[in-house]
Image: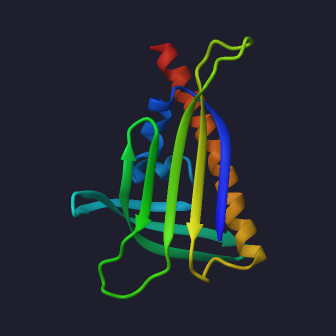
Amino acid sequence: MQIERDTEVPGAPERVFALVDDLSAYPRWMDLVHEVHEVPAIEDQRTWDVELRAQVGPFARSKRLRMVRTVHEPGRRVVFERAEIDGRRHSSWILSATLNPVSNSESSDAEHTRLVMTLTYGGNLWTGAVLQRVLDDHVERGANALCALLVETDVADDAT
């Protein structure tokens, strides 16, 4: 299963990147990411324990993952991949974010960034039309919350 969200968000790529290159920041804007703890790096790659949680009516599904940052191109691209250390085979989870500046339009002097986030899942816990829709809804809400957070921090920066 793969979900891709292509969104134009307010702010320069470097500013947006600060919210997508560290999984510890995700609970601020992505409700699917319930809890995150950074743990010792794996082979010099930043590493996090992540709990994902989604609600389907009265039922909740959750999943714990150990994620490593496998690609880090500041201001441009970041990729996180599941990397468990228990010696067992696990379904893949890959999250990537690619950022590109958007040319200023005539109606706006503010900088914007095109953010493309892709979540790829290779297992069966989150499959099925209902769960895929729930997962997609979380991603949609996360994109909206990220935009709101960027606007909020922009307003706070202007006030200081």
Residue 130 found in image quarter:
bottom right
Q: Is residue 39 left or right of residue 89?
A: left
Q: Is residue 31 visible?
A: no
Residue 74 % position (x, y): 38, 38
Quarter location, residue 70? bottom left
Extreme residue toward the right, this view: 129
Residue closest to the eye, 25 or 159: 25
Query: x%, y% of residue 44?
Result: 22, 57
Q: Indicate the quadrant containing the N terminus: top left, top right, bottom left or bottom right.
A: bottom right
| Viewer-closest of 87 and 151 | 87
Give me the residue at 44% from left, 30% from top.
14
From the viewer's perspective, is residue 62 above or below residue 106? Answer: below
Q: Is residue 142 above or below residue 19?
A: below
Q: Quadrant of the C terminus?
A: top left
Type of colouring? rainbow
Q: Measuring 57% from the left and 66% from the top, which residue is drawn there?
A: 120
Left or right: 115 as drawn, with respect to 57: left
Q: Nearer the viewer, residue 118 or 34?
A: 118
Where is residue 91? Give x, y as percent: 50, 80
Number of on-image labels: 0
From where the camera sits, is residue 139 visible? yes
Q: Residue at x 50, y 14 (%)?
A: 159
